[in-house]
Amino acid sequence: MNNEIHVESGESFSPEERATLRRIIGSRRDVRKFRSDPIPEESLWRMLEAAHAAPSVGFSQPWDFILIDSREIRQSIHDNFVAVNEREKNRVEPGQRRELYSSLKLEGILESPLNLAVTCCHAKEKEFVLGVGTMPQMISYSVCLAVQNLWLTARAEGIGVGWVSIVEPGPVKQLLGLPDHVELIAYLCIGYPQEFRSRPLLEEVGWKPREDLEKHLFRNRWGQKEKTEGF
């Protein structure tokens, strides 16, 4: 399959296309409950193409993608999740807050038809990579952009993605055979969701509200909120 996304130079987008993009972004969710239907190869390929088309510092393209359909590997990673999740639950203050945590489904490792590990190759840092001299973390940040591209494309395909961070990276790296210079950035569960919720789950159940954009918007200096007309 062709591994590039081609667009005409200087191509503009219609109001309808811009509205569609906003709708895709606004309806993206962290999915935990999946159907067992397999993911069509064409859809998966479009998701991976989109990830590979992400911007990267110095055009380094430091990402790799490991498709995980081994039940044995997934069971081991799920066991790791269960142990870490119990530890994390005990960090939450006792009472309603901890009960709410216990009620949340925070992964779909075994239910989803596919798991995907997204990694970052730090061997590239030994070369000269334009733009990382004073901010080497930009290599890892670039991989996060690839994850977002994949996630939004999955949503457009009607496919759900769940990012599982409640695992110990060390054991997962060992299970996946990652060499020392390769960092695990994201462990994703992918498949058709039982539903796309109208709001993020943690907002819906009252774990945390969505904050207003204005709270995070400053002008010229951190914390400066003086009002001006427009932007």
Image (spheres, helix red, strand yellow):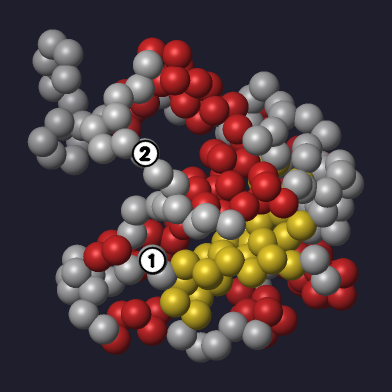
Q: Is residue 220 left or right of residue 178?
A: left
Quarter of the C terminus within the rendering: top left
Residue at left offset 51%, top offset 30%: 25
Which of the two discs, 2 and 1, sits closer to the camera?
Answer: 2
Specify which label sits upstream in the sequence, 2 or 1: 2
Residue 102 location (% of width, % of height): 80, 47
Residue at left offset 67%, top offset 61%: 116
Residue type highlighted by circle 2: Val
Q: Which residue is mark 1?
A: 61
**Front in this rendered view, residue 38 or 190:** 38
Residue type highlighted by circle 1: Gln
Residue at left offset 72%, top offset 81%: 175
Mark drawn on residue 7: 2
Q: Is residue 202 visible?
A: no
Residue 131 location (% of width, % of height): 19, 66
**Front in this rendered view, residue 36 or 166:** 36
Q: Is residue 195 left or right of residue 204?
A: right
Q: Is residue 5 above or below residue 84?
A: above
Residue at left offset 75%, top offset 47%: 40
Looking at the image, do the residues carrying marks 2 and 1 touch, with CB atoms under 8 Å apart?
A: no
Mark drawn on residue 43: none
Q: Is residue 186 above or below residue 154?
A: below
Which quadrant holds residue 99? top right
Quarter of the N terminus within the rendering: bottom right
Q: Is residue 71 above or below residue 231?
A: below
Which element carries disc 1, helix, strand or loop? loop
Residue 14 location (% of width, % of height): 37, 16
